[in-house]
Amino acid sequence: MAAAPMAAASPARAAVSEPAVQATFDETLARFGAEIYRFALHLTRNRTDADDLYQETALKAYRAWDRLPCDANHRAWLYRIASNTFLSDKRKTSRLRSLDAEATVESIPAASRDDDGRLDAGNLLREVEVFIEALPPKQRIALVQRKYLDIGYPEIAATLGCSEEAARRSVHEALRKLRDRFGDRI
């Protein structure tokens, strides 16, 4: 893929400083692609859906590359595209989902313990995964970026298009809901 065109510098300006070299789309995707794919995998919990989300993110990024300012935070920009693509797909599928499927997600069984009173870690893990999938999309994205991918709040805020404080609140709310639901079982 070709590099984004750069504006020609005037001769007077070129003598003072060299123009900044903008990374190409290929270089940017090579640098952050694996990270974006891991993010897609955490969001979707399914390799096929993660592949689709990653490809859709790359395609949307490629189409918008020429409109991106030279000094943009490419990493946050790619995360934002992936997040928005995930959110719009979630909205679309939630409109299409049948009432039976919705009832199944909401009727998660209570804590399952074995005869000795020890936790069945496998069942607990599956319940936590289902619970995280059911979180509001922005809370889920913020939680995944913070706790699974160790991304800072400024970049989470850039991804979600909100303030840093709102990003912190989203992570806090998601963690609070997890503690409320599973705190007595851990």
Image (spheres, rainbow, N blue to C red):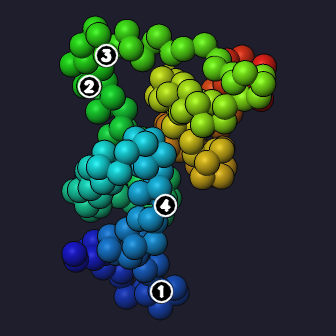
Q: Where is residue 108 in the image (x, y as percent from the top left)?
A: 51, 15
Q: Which of marks 3 and 2 is nearer the N terminus?
A: 2
Label 2 SS? helix
The three-letter code of the residue at mark 2 reads Thr
Which one is earlier in the sequence, the residue at label 3 or at label 1?
A: 1
Q: Which of 20 and 86 is in front in this view?
A: 86
Label 4 crowding class (10 Å Cα cut-off): few <14, some 14-19, many 20+? some
Dot 2 or dot 4: first in sequence order is: 4
Identify residue for label 3: 101
User: Label 1 to label 4, Cα distance in Å?
Assistant: 31 Å
Instruction: Return the x and y of residue 180 as percentages of the image width and height.
Output: 72, 17
Q: In this view, does 37 lie to the left or right of 124?
A: left
Location of the N terminus (image quadrant) = bottom left
Mark in front: 3 vs 4: 3
- Residue 93 is labelled as 2
Disc 1 is placed on an element classified as loop
> Whole-Å distance between the Cαs marked 2 and 4?
25 Å
Residue in the foreground of this view, choosing between 131 and 11: 131
Amino acid found under the numbered disc labelled 4: Glu
Front label number (3 vs 1): 3
| Label 3: which secondary element | helix
- The residue under label 4 is 35
